[in-house]
Amino acid sequence: MTKQGEIDYVKNIGNEGMLHALNKPFSDSECGFYLIDIGIIIGLLPEPLAKLLDLGVGTGWTSAFFAKRGYEVLGQDICPDMISLANKNKDRYQALSTSFIISDYENLEFSEEFDCAVFYDSLHHAENEHLALEKVYKALKPGGVLITAEPGKGHSKSLDGKKAMLKYGVTEKAD
């Protein structure tokens, strides 16, 4: 798959899909699992006021949650339309310590700027996950923490994974 599928994702999912994405995690049948995941991640992060890099943020709901907990958050996504939605969620959740950039996490150019970084359900969209991890480790301060939470083995072969790849042209790895 190509990165263009990721960039055009919001345009391709239609208004109903966009509203579902904007209201995530609450709009999703997996809401309880997402909230559990975020609770676990927050429990593994350094104490608040740490500077957090949130990677592949989509609509930014994770960034808003991290900011409400007290982190200074920079959220990143390759899709400009997702960043527009993320800014709506920033306002909705009054996540004042959050900012967003349009960027490919495989091309990040940060150097020792963040205390922690999180890939939540996003690393499997990388064309080169090793390069993405390399770039993020470079962005972390010495002793920084990187947390990844991914859908797991078999995801790209699941019905949902196959449907997303065929219908939207996105990358779905996890095998």
Image: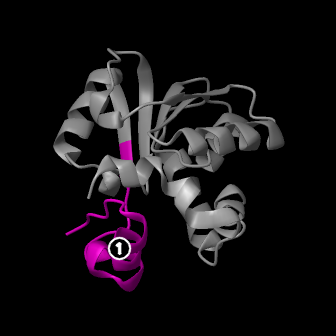
Q: Residues within 10 Å of mark 1 (few under 14, many from 20)?
A: few
Nearest the eye: 38 or 169: 169
Nearest the eye: 108 or 111: 108
Q: Residue at x 32, y 74 (%)?
A: 155
Q: How is the image coloured?
A: one colour
- Is residue 74 shown left or right of residue 31? left
Q: Quadrant of residue 66?
A: top right
Q: Quadrant of the N terminus?
A: bottom left
**In this picture, which residue range is highlighted in magenta?**
147-175
Residue 130 x, y percent position in the rendering:
17, 43
The answer to if 164 sits in the magenta stretch is yes
Residue 57 x, y percent position in the rendering:
52, 45
The amino acid type found where label 1 is placed reads: Leu
Q: Quadrant of the C terminus?
A: bottom left
Residue at the spot of label 1? 166
Residue 171 x, y percent position in the rendering:
31, 59
Picture layout, residue 96 above or below residue 22:
above
Nearest the eye: 63 or 104: 104
Q: So how many labels did they put on this image?
A: 1
- Is residue 76 shown left or right of residue 99? left
Picture layout, residue 135 above or below residue 163:
above
Q: Residue at x 33, y 51 (%)?
A: 123
Nearest the eye: 64 or 146: 64
- Is residue 26 shown left or right of residue 117? right
Q: Quadrant of residue 93?
A: top right
* Residue sitting farthest toward the bottom: 159
Q: Residue at x 72, y 66 (%)?
A: 26
